Image: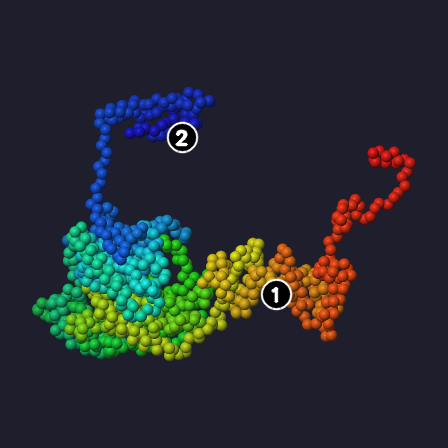
Amino acid sequence: MLCTFTTPRPAPHPLLEPLRGRCPCPQAFTLYPRNLVTSRSYSLRRCSRQAALSSAAEAGSSAATPEAPPAIHFDKHELVLEVGDRKITLETGEIGRQASGAVMARDGDTMIYTTACCDAAPEEGAPGARHGSPLQVHYAERFSAAGRTSGGYVKRDGRAKEHEILISRLVDRPLRPLLPADWRRPTQVLSWVLSFDGARGTEALAVTAAGAALALSAVPIRAAVAAVRVGLIPGRGLVLDPDSEEVEASVLDLLVAGSAEGLLMVEAGAEFVTEADMLEAIAFGQAAVQKMCVAIDAWAAQVGKPAAEASEASDAGDLEGSAALDAVRARFGDAYKTLHRSALDKAGREAALRALRSEAVDALTPAAAGDAPAPDAAALGAACRALEQETARRLTAREGVRMDGRAPDAVRGISCRAGALPRTHGSALFTRGETQVLAVATLGCEEGVRRLDSMAGQEDDRFYLQYFFPPSCVGETGRQGPAGRREIGHGALAQRALAPAVPPEAEFPYSIRLESTVTESNGSSSMATVCAGCLALLDAGVPLKGLVAGVAMGLVLDAQAPGGFRVLTDILGAEDALGDMDFKVAGDAHGISALQLDVKAAGGITGEVAAAALGAARAARLAVLRAMGACAPPPRGSLAAHAPRLRRVPVPAGKLGLLIGAGGRTLRALQAEHRVSLQLSDGEGPGGTGDDGAPAPAWAAIRADSQADADAAAEAILALVDEPERGRVYRGARVTQVLPFGALVEVAPRREGLLHLSEWAAPGAPQPRLAADVAAVGDAVDVQILDVLDGGKLRLSRKALLDPVEGYDAEAAAAAAAEAGAQRGNGGADDGARYKRRRPRGEGAGNGAPRRYARGPPRERQASPDSSAASADTAA
C-alpha cells in the first residue's frame, strides 16, 4: 500500500498544495519546510502506520523472492502449401485460441488472420435458431497493414468499402454450398488483412484462409475450400498466382475456388479471350486447388476440432420420405406437373402455386382428415414447397420442359431501344422476357472520376457502373438506402464485362458513369445490365470497340437426365433458385470479357459440365448480339447536343504556373472569357501524350458546353504556354498600350510584343506619324512575330500580313531603305537602332574618355579682383 503526500497542518504553503493526497492515516506524510524562501526543500516524517507497512515489506522481501510468472506454451501447428513455385503458410494454435477455428495465412509478407465461429446449440426449452442460411462472411483491410492511414476524415477502420464487400462475396460463395442443409446455428467467418506487401492481391489467400479456418472449426463443413489466381500472358501462356506486374500484362484475370471434389466458384475478367482458353485456364487452376484442398483436409483431420451435429432439420432437404411429403405427392403430384407444363408468366405461376398450396393444406390438415393422423399446416406447407422444387427439377432435367415453355437452349424475346431519356447524355431500355433494365450514361471530366482509397493506395476509376435493384422491380416493398451486397456485386460484374470495350483515355478523355436501374426482374438482371449499358454508352457517343452482351446459364443435375445434367439458357428467377449452378457469361462475338460461376451442389461440377455451359452460352450470346444490332431506334453514336465537350491540352514542363497566374487570376480569366471549366494536372497526360501525340508531363483538361468554346480555350492555352517562334501569326491580338512610336500588343495572356509604327501600314502605304492616330487600347489587330529578342521580347509586324499597295516595288523600297541607313551611318541596320539611348551626363564620346561637362567646355569668364585670391587658393 502506498500513501500519497499531504500538505502539513496547519496553514500549508501554496507550493505544497499540489502535493495533497488521500491517505487513511491521520497524519500521513507531514512535510516541514526548512527554508521556504531560498532552497524550497522539505524534510519528510512518515506516519507510524506507513513505517510499519514498509518494515513488513522489507522483511518479506528479504525472506522470499517472488517467482517469475510461468511461460505460456502454445500448441502451434503449421501447414505449408506449394502453389506453383511459391509457398503459402497456414498457422493455428497461437493466435485466436478461443475461436472455434483460427488461421494466420501468409503469402510472402501478406498476412491474413481469419476466424470461424458458430453459436452453441440452443438449450433445452430455448427457442431455436432462426430459419434460413446462418453463414456470415466479413473481410476487412487494415490501412496499417501497408503502413498507411486512411485519407478520409474518419481514421478508424470499420465501415466496409466496396472492394471489401466484393472480396467478402468471393469468400462466401464457395463456402455456402458446403454447409449441411440442416445446419441452423449462426456461423460467422471474419478475415482481417494485417500485413500487405502489395506484390499480389489478397482474394485467393482470403478464400483459402477462410476454408482452412472452417475446416479446423466445429462447423460441419463438407470439405476444405481453397482458391488460386490464374493469368494468361501473351507469349508465356498460363501463369499460376501472378504478381501485380504479371496481372497488368495478362489478358485474363481468373479466380478459381473449389474443393477436392470439384469446382465451386469462378470469377473472371478478360480481354475477350476464347472459350477454349477460358476452359484451359479453369482446368489449370482447378488442378492446383485440388492439391491444396487435399493437404488442408489432412491437416484439419489431425489438429481440427470435432464437427458439431446439426440437429435442426430443414423444411426441404430432409423431407424425403416424410408423411407430409408423401401425402402431398399422392394427392397433388399430378396437379403440380400440370402447373409446371402450363407455361405461365411469373405472376400467374406464383398465383397458381399459392392457390394449389392453400388447397393442399386445407385438404390434408387434421381437421379435414377426421380421426386419421395427419401432419400439421406448417409441415404441409414445407412439403408443398419441396414438391414444387422436386417436380420442376425432374421435368426440366429429364424431359427438357421449362416453366415458361421454352426449349432448354432458347433465349427469351428481346426488345431494345436507345435514346429513351431526352436530356441524358446517353440512355437505353433493354427488355428480355420479364427482365427489364434502364441504363443511363453520363460523361464528365476529371471531377467525375470515382476515387478509391485502400491499403494498396489511392486510385481513380474513370469508368464505373452503379447498379440499382429497387423492390418494385419484383412487385414488393422493401428498404431504400445504401447499396446492398447484391447490388454492389452485380454492378461490379457488369462493369467488368464492359470495361475491355471502353476506349483508353488517350482516345476518349471523358469520365464515364453508367447507371443501371432494374425496372422488372425475372432472372439475369446483371446480364441485362450489360446489354442495356452497352447501348447507352453507344448512345452517349462512347466509341466502344464493339457490342457486348451477356447471358445467364443454369444447370440441373439428375442421374436420369441425358449425360447426368441439363444446361439451361437464359434462366428465369425460379430456375435459378431450384438449379445447381448460376453461370453468367458476357463478351462480344469474338470472346469472353467476364465470367461468374456459382455452384450450389456440394460436390461441385466437372470440366465437362463447364465446357457444355460455355458452348451453350456462346450460342446464346451471339443471338443476343444480333438482337442488339437491330435496336430501334439505334444509338446516336455521337455526343449529345447538351453533353460536355472535353479537350486535353499538353502543357510543357514548368508552364503550369503561367496558366494559374498570381493568385489564380490567369486561370479564372481564361474560364470567364471562354466560358469553360479548366482542371490542371501535373501528372502525365492520357497515355503519356497530348492531343498531338507528343510527350506531355502535364496537361490541362477543358470542359465546355460547346465545341467552339473548347477550341477557343485550347488555342488560348497553347498561345500562353507555347514558346513564341519567328513567323507565327496571331489573329485578333489586343492592343494594351499606345506609345508615341508604336503600340504594345498582347498576343497571349501576359505575353506582349512591340508593334512599331514602321510595321503598321501596308507596304507602299504612307506611314503614320503617331501611333495614337491609328490604334487605341482594346483594338484587335492581326500581327506576325518578326523576331524574338533576348529576354523573350517580341518584335511584331502588321505590315507583313497586308498586301502591298498597287504599284509598290519591293526591291526599290529595300534599296532606298539601305541607302537611307548608309547616310545615317548605320549601314542600313535594324530600324530599332535609330532609337538610340541618350548618352548619360558625364560620359565621353568617341574613345569613351570621361568628360567633365556634358554640354561642351565651360564659357570663359573674367575673374573679378575680389575673387582672385580665392581663386588662387582654390587652384592651389
Instruction: Determine crowd level at label 1: few under 14, some 14-19, many 20+ residues with C-alpha closer than 10 A.
Output: few
- Direction from residue 41 to residue 741 in the image, left or right: right
Amino acid bearing label 1:
Arg
Q: Quadrant of the N terminus?
A: top left
Splitting the image into 4 quarters, where does residue 829 fall?
bottom right
Q: Where does the image place residue 847, in percent across and percent down from the top left?
A: 76, 49
Residue 675, x across and y down, in percent: 55, 65
Q: In the shown orientation, is residue 449 left or right of residue 773?
A: left
In front here: 415 or 553? 553
Residue 153 appears in the figure? yes
Label 2 vs 1, first from the N-terminus: 2
Gap in Å between the C-alphas at discs 2 and 1? Answer: 82 Å
Q: Is residue 516 visible?
A: no
Amino acid type of disc 2? Pro
Where is mark 2, residue-wise?
Answer: 18
Between residue 518 and residue 560, name the one nearer to us: 560
Q: Residue at x 39, y 64 (%)?
A: 464
Image location of residue 656, percent across then percent down: 53, 57
Where is residue 291, by image quadrant?
Answer: bottom left
Residue 843 position (above or below residue 514): above
At numbered mark 2, what does the secondary structure look like: helix, strand or loop?
helix
Q: Quadrant of the C terminus?
A: top right
- Decide: is 493 above or below 112: below
- Secondary element under disc 1, as helix, strand or loop, is loop
Residue 775 appears at what percent x and percent y? Answer: 70, 65
Image point 20% across, 55% down: which residue? 296
Q: Residue furthest top?
A: 34
2 or 1: mark nearer the eye:
1
Q: Is residue 407 left or right of residue 592?
A: left
* In the image, farthest residue toward the right: 865
Residue for badge 1: 728
Residue depicted at x 71% and y 70%: 810
